[in-house]
Amino acid sequence: MFKNLLLPFLLTTVVQVFSQEKFYDNVLFLNSRMDGNYFYSKASYTSPSSIKNIDNKLPVSEDTFFTPGNSLQLDFVNGKNGSWSAKIDKPEWRGQDKLKEGEILSFAVNVSSATDISNLPAIQIGLADSTISQPLPVSRYFVIIQHGKWTKVLIPLKDFAGIKLKNSDDVKAVIFSQNSTDGNEHVMYVDDIEIRPSVLPALRSDRASISLANGYAKHVDIEWKPVTDTSVRFIKIYRSVDGKNFHPVGVQIPSSSRFADFTRETGKIFYYRISLLGYDDRESSASPVVSAKTRAMTEQELLTMVQEACFRYYWEGAEENSGLAKEDIPGRHNMIAMGASGFGIMALIAGTERKFITRDESTDRFLKIANFLERTETFHGAFSHFVDGPTGKVVPFFGSKDNGGDLVETSFLMQGLIAARAYFNKNNTKEKEIRDKITGIWNNVEWSWYRKEPETKFLTWHWSPDQGWILNHQLIGWNETMVTYLLAIASPTHPVPASLYYTGWANRDSTGQQYRKNWGQTDQGSMYTNGNSYYGIKLDVGVSNGGPLFFTHYSYLGFDPHYLTDVYTNYFKNNRNIALINHRYCIENPGHYIGYSDSCWGLTASDGPYHYVANEPILRADNGKIAPTGAISSFPYTPKQSMKALSNYYYNYGHFLWGEYGFRDAFNLSENWCSEIFMGLNQAPMVVMIENYRTGLLWKLFMSDPQIKKVANKIRHKQ
Ligand code: CA
């Protein structure tokens, strides 16, 4: 379980380079996602020196910035015999390890106080190995201070002494510190901290084009034609309320052709234009103006809005060659995540049915997907967790041992494909081809081979072509992997006996008990069954008090839990109770985290302030982080509570949480943190489970499969 959590241990072992991968600019600071203070900073001082801080972090300025919408404020006093320092760390997220090499540390500075050049701070860089360079006076790189104006400061990395810098990727922080003792207060703003090559292209495009703006309740979506000019660093977005006076509200990187501007106002016309910003800081002329009016929206319209935005992650945001889902955006451009792709396939179906795209567009995409999957490297028919889009080869992103088949990811993919095979039911060449190709892929998966030995009680998670069963992870429930057993039993070509459901998934002997105790750190639920009540809600099956909410989502996007009853419980009821326990826990909020309420709940697995982590409704597994997918993907179980959460996240937190693909992955108000990324595993379950709540579409499609129907009967009784 929680295979994603292996990341911190394994990531260091393998970083495979594929020549086609697009590289990101190496940015240390561009904007703070949150108002107030900047999460990835640390300010400290000893009197009589000081530096202004909020909770020991640098203040964020929304009034003064180089790139919209904000910059960092350094408001300091250089006292005699005192000191101050301000450290700005590079935010890191999954897959953002393909960075352009550079030789120059570059940042924008705006000195607003009447500061003499000699009173500017010193600067150091901090490396991945925690070593820190010797301080350099910033003044050395200034010719003259233009007070109240932005200046770019360029420092060759080779000027930083006392460190062994091999790759510019290794620069993980910059540190400003006191460098004089004049005793006065100084204020300067810092923005756009990055490592850049010494030679940068001059902006080639002279004009931007803009397609349209769409108004929603509190935001406007702005779209433009994809920008292919590689000399463009950003698309800069300007907003106006009168059509005449425009001010910049944000920047977008060229790999995206969309910007969500959260205006916070309903029933108002907003005007937009965009321009292109070059690496040379030149700006193109502005696009024509488009406008849109924000409008009050019903709950039904809000649901559709969330579905469409999250759907776009898999439609516009897909990896180009395969049409499948990336692990996260921003993240690796070329890497496909197979489980997320299976979820995304179901989101594409929901989006087709809701007419976000035409059936023809959808058919073409699914043909592309099916053609790609036919050619993708498999291991006894099972797909890998991560695959390189351009080549179809395995990417051992979680480490060199994870270079083969992943049966759980394969089952998430197959869940989506089986729903797609039922959806594309028209009697035409293209749809027939999709069905036939999916049947071929499904028939190829050797589920029974993943028992490791013919007579074992369990399915095994991974197999490596050169290291065999080295990861040796037996699949034991209850967690997110139920559908793996269900599909293995359903397979028309390589099935496992239905008895494996009870001997493996619901195993009750010492192997199963120990496995559950290890992850739950409790005896509760170690027998698969639980039987305790939490907040007055009885839990039939589940470790601890039910675990993270993704357990109730991943296996049930297609498999309708209403039809899943074994000798211990019915899984719609059990899932609903797990969601209710999670909801009640967040209302009681024993950790006293900011924001938790009946409209801000749902602990599950997501990106976090420090790394990806699965949170649960127990104190030791709760760090104040909420992922919108937790409550929203629980819609079929808890429609009222989920709607309250969705509304709260959009109306009250949308200014930091809402983006071009819907809600960002997670936020933590106690830490004043919001994720920079959208995750493939988390956006699609929102689309699919809202759809299952509204129409039951994906459940109906998946359950219409004759082989799937039979499974539900096979596990009803113990064999
Ligand atoms: Ca900025």
Image: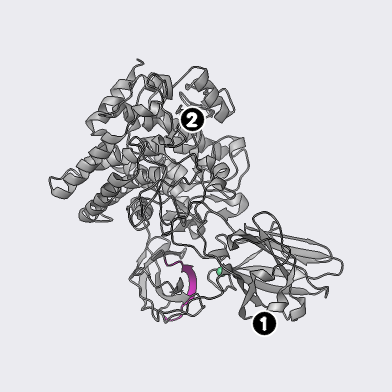
Count residues near mark 2 (Cα–Cα under 10 Å), then give few for <14, some for 14-19, many for 20+: few
Q: Amino acid at mark 2?
A: Asn
Nearest the viewer among 254 and 239 is 254
Q: Identify the element where label 2 is drawn.
A: loop
Ligand 1 is found in the corner quadrant, namely bottom right
Q: Which residues are magenta?
A: 244-254
User: Where residue 644 appears, x then y in whole percent?
Assistant: 45, 46
Disc 1 designates what residue? 147
Q: Identify the element where label 1 is drawn.
A: loop
312 over 468 or under it: above or below: below
Instruction: Tell whether position 204 is magenta.
Output: no
Left or right, residue 400 beside residue 182: left
User: Where residue 147 appears, x then y in whole percent?
Assistant: 67, 82
User: Where residue 502 appears, x then y in whole percent?
Assistant: 40, 20
Q: Amino acid at mark 1?
A: His
Instruction: Tell whether position 246 is magenta.
Output: yes
